[in-house]
C-alpha cells in the first residue's frame, strides 16, 4: 500500500474516534513520511501538533496502523510546516469529499425573483435557522412567536413586530422565520428586505415613473419580511407606499414581519397610521442575553465553524462581551483568525490581549478556572454525567423511565454524540440500548436545548466539569 493511501485509510478510521473539530484542526497537512525498520515517521506541520499527537493520538494511530501493516511497532513525529501547503500533507477536504454523505440543504431558493424586471429582493441566507438560534430568557418569547408564525403564516400573529437593540438577533430571527416558512410551505413566496432597500426601490420607481410595477411586485407576496423599519423615519412617500402594501397583504391574510430598534410607539418620524398597523399584531422584544446564554451562543458558533476553543477562553469572552451578540461574534472571529495564523490554541492571555486591542478597557474581574482534564472514554463521560445529576451510573444504564433518570440518560447519549462524535451504534452499545433509541435521545435533547433553559445550563455545567 502506498504511504498516502495507508494514511488515508488510517484517517478514515480515526475520524470516527476523534471529535470532529479536533480532527480537522490537527490532522490537516499530515502524512506518513516513511516506514523504516518498523518505525513509521508521521509528518506534522507544527511543533504544537507534535505535543498534542504525543499525548493524545499516538496510541490510536499506532493501533490503526498496525491493522494495515503489522511490521510497524513504533511511531515518530517529524515537523515540517511546509506540509500544510505542499503535496506531501494530506488535505482533509479531499478525504471529506470521498466519505461525506450529502448534507441536507434548504431547497435551493435563497434568491427568488419577484418581478418581471428581474429584481431580486428575497435574500434569505440559509445559515440563519430557528434551530441555530440559542434561546434564553431574553429572547424566548420572540423565538416562540417566530416559530408559531413559521408553522402558520398569516394566522398565528399578524403582523409580528420584533424589536431590540443592534446585534441582538433580530435579523437572524426574521431570516430564520423566512427560511422556515419556505421549508414548511414551499409554494409561499417569501420576500425578505430591509427598509433601506424598500426606500431605494421607491425612489427608483418614482424616478422611472413606474410605481405600478413596483406595487404589483410587493403585493403578490405571501410573506413579507421587512427589517429595520426605523429607517422609514421622515420618508413620507416611502411610508405611504409601504402602508398600502402592508394593508393589501394584511387584508389578504398574508404574513408580515417587521423588525425595528425600538417599539412602535417610540418610533420617531413615522406616520401614526403606520404605527397603529405595527401595533395590531404581536409585539416581542429581544434584549441582551445573560451570561449563560452568551456562552451557549459562543459554543454554538464554534460548533458551526468547526473550531475548538478552551472553555476558559469562551467563558472569558462571554463574561466580558455584554453589549451585543454581534460584538461577541466579532471577538470570536478575531480569536479564531489569530489562532489560525499562529497555529496555536489561544490561551486566556491571548484573548485578553485581543480585548485590549479592540479597546475593551474595563475588563471585569474574572475567576481563573482550574486546569481541566478532558475525559476521553465513553465510560468516563457517563460517570461524570451520573455524578452531575446525582444518579447511580447503573440507573443510567438501566430501564427506569422516570424523568429524573430518563433526562440524564438522554443527556449522556447526546454528549457522546455531539461532543465525542460517537456513532449511534457505539452509543447504543455503551448505554445498553439500540441505535434508534440513541438517535431519538439525541434529537430529544437537541429539541429541549431550544426551549428548556435548565437543560442548556446542565449541558454547559457538564461540559465544564468534563473540561471541554
Ligand atoms: P440584529 O439584526 O438584531 O442587529 P443580528 O440578527 O444580525 O442582529 O445578530 C448578530 C449576530 O449575532 C448574527 O450573526 C446572529 O446569528 C447572532 N445571534 C444573535 N442572537 C443569537 C442567538 N440567540 N443565537 C445564535 N446567534 C445569535
Ligand atoms: Mg439586523
Image (tube, rainbow, N blue to C red):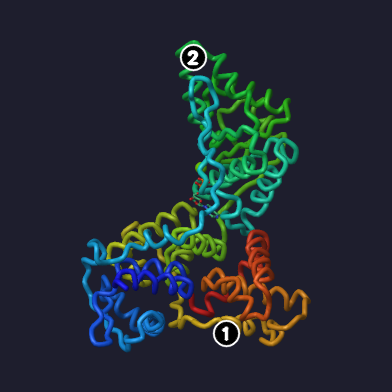
Percent across and percent down for residue 106 are: 56, 46
In the image as oriented, which residue stretches furthest toward the top?
Answer: 209
**Left or right: residue 17 compared with residue 287:** left
Q: Is residue 279 above or below residue 99?
A: above
Q: Residue furthest front?
A: 1
Name which quarter of the figure residue 338 lies in.
bottom left
Q: Distance between the residues labelled 2 and 1?
A: 69 Å
Viewer-side residue, 206 vs 336: 336
Question: Can residue 355 be seen here?
Answer: no
| Residue 253 locus on image (x, y percent) | 73, 30
Ligand 2 has an atom within 8 Å of the beta carbon of the residue at disc 2: no
Horizontal relation, residue 339 to residue 141: left or right: left
Q: Is 312 displayed left or right of 87 in the figure?
A: right
Which residue is at 64% across, 83% downward? Answer: 386
Q: Say which quadrant the N terminus sits in.
A: bottom left
Rendered image quadrant of residue 48: bottom left
Residue drawn at (58%, 39%), measured in percent from left and top? Answer: 259
Residue at 49 percent of width and 82 percent of height: 376
| Secondary structure category for the residue under label 1 | helix
Which residue is at the front of the view, 271 or 127? 127
Q: Quickly name the residue at label 1.
A: 379
Task: Decide: few, some or many residues near mark 2? Use Cα within 10 Å; few <14, some 14-19, many ≥20.
Answer: some
Give the vertical position of 300 relative to 372 (above or below): above
Residue 93: which disc?
A: none
Indicate which disc, 2 or 1, sits on the residue closer to the N terminus.
Answer: 2
Q: How crowded is mark 1: few (under 14 residues within 10 Å), some or many (20 or more)?
A: few
- For this view, does 310 lie left or right of residue 168? left
Q: To which residue does mark 2 refer? A: 206
Q: Where is residue 455 in the image (x, y as percent from the top left)?
A: 65, 68
Amino acid at each position: 500500500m502506498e504511504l498516502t493511501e495507508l494514511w488515508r485509510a488510517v484517517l478514515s478510521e480515526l475520524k470516527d474516534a476523534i471529535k470532529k473539530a479536533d480532527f480537522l484542526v490537527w490532522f490537516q497537512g499530515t502524512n506518513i513520511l516513511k516506514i523504516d525498520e518498523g518505525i513509521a515517521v508521521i509528518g506534522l506541520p507544527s511543533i504544537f501538533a507534535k505535543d498534542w499527537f504525543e499525548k493524545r493520538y499516538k496510541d490510536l494511530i499506532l493501533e490503526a496502523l498496525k491493522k494495515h501493516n503489522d511490521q510497524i511497532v513504533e511511531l515518530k513525529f517529524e515537523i515540517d510546516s511546509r506540509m500544510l501547503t505542499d503535496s506531501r500533507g494530506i488535505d482533509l477536504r479531499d478525504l471529506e469529499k470521498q466519505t461525506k454523505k450529502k448534507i441536507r440543504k434548504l431547497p435551493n431558493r435563497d434568491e427568488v425573483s419577484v418581478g418581471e424586471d428581474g429584481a431580486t429582493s428575497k435574500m434569505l441566507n440559509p445559515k440563519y435557522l430557528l434551530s441555530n438560534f440559542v434561546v434564553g430568557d431574553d429572547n424566548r418569547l420572540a423565538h416562540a412567536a417566530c416559530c408559531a408564525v413559521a408553522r402558520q403564516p398569516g394566522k398565528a400573529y399578524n403582523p409580528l413586530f420584533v424589536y431590540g437593540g443592534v446585534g441582538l438577533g433580530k435579523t437572524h430571527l426574521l431570516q430564520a422565520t423566512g427560511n422556515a416558512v419556505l421549508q414548511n410551505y414551499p409554494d409561499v413566496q417569501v420576500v425578505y428586505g430591509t427598509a433601506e432597500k424598500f426606500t431605494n426601490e421607491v425612489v427608483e420607481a418614482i424616478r422611472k415613473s413606474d410605481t405600478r410595477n413596483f406595487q404589483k411586485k410587493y403585493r403578490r407576496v405571501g410573506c413579507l419580511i421587512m427589517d429595520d423599519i426605523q429607517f422609514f423615519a421622515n420618508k413620507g412617500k416611502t411610508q405611504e407606499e409601504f402602508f398600502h402594501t402592508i394593508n393589501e397583504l394584511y387584508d389578504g391574510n398574508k404574513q408580515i414581519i417587521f423588525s425595528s430598534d425600538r417599539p412602535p410607539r417610540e418610533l420617531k418620524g413615522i406616520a401614526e397610521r403606520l404605527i397603529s398597523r405595527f401595533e395590531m399584531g404581536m409585539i416581542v422584544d429581544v434584549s441582551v442575553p445573560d451570561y449563560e446564554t452568551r456562552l451557549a451562543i459562543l459554543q454554538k458558533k464554534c460548533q458551526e465553524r468547526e473550531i475548538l476553543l478552551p472553555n476558559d477562553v469562551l467563558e472569558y469572552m462571554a463574561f466580558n462581551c455584554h453589549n451585543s451578540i454581534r460584538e461577541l461574534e466579532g471577538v470570536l472571529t478575531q480569536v479564531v483568525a489569530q489562532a489560525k495564523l499562529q497555529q496555536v490554541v489561544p490561551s486566556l492571555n491571548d484573548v485578553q490581549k485581543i480585548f485590549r486591542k479592540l479597546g475593551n478597557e474595563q475588563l471585569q474581574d474574572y475567576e481563573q478556572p482550574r486546569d481541566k482534564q478532558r475525559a476521553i472514554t465513553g465510560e468516563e463521560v457517563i460517570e461524570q454525567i451520573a455524578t452531575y445529576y446525582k444518579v447511580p451510573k447503573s440507573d443510567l444504564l438501566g430501564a427506569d423511565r422516570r424523568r429524573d433518570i430518563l433526562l440524564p440518560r438522554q443527556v449522556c447519549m447526546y454528549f457522546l454524540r455531539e461532543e465525542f462524535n460517537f456513532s449511534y451504534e457505539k452509543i447504543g452499545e455503551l448505554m445498553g440500548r439500540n441505535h434508534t433509541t440513541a438517535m431519538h435521545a439525541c434529537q430529544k435533547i437537541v429539541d429541549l436545548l431550544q426551549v428548556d433553559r435548565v437543560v442548556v445550563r446542565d449541558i454547559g455545567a457538564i461540559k465544564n466539569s468534563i473540561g471541554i
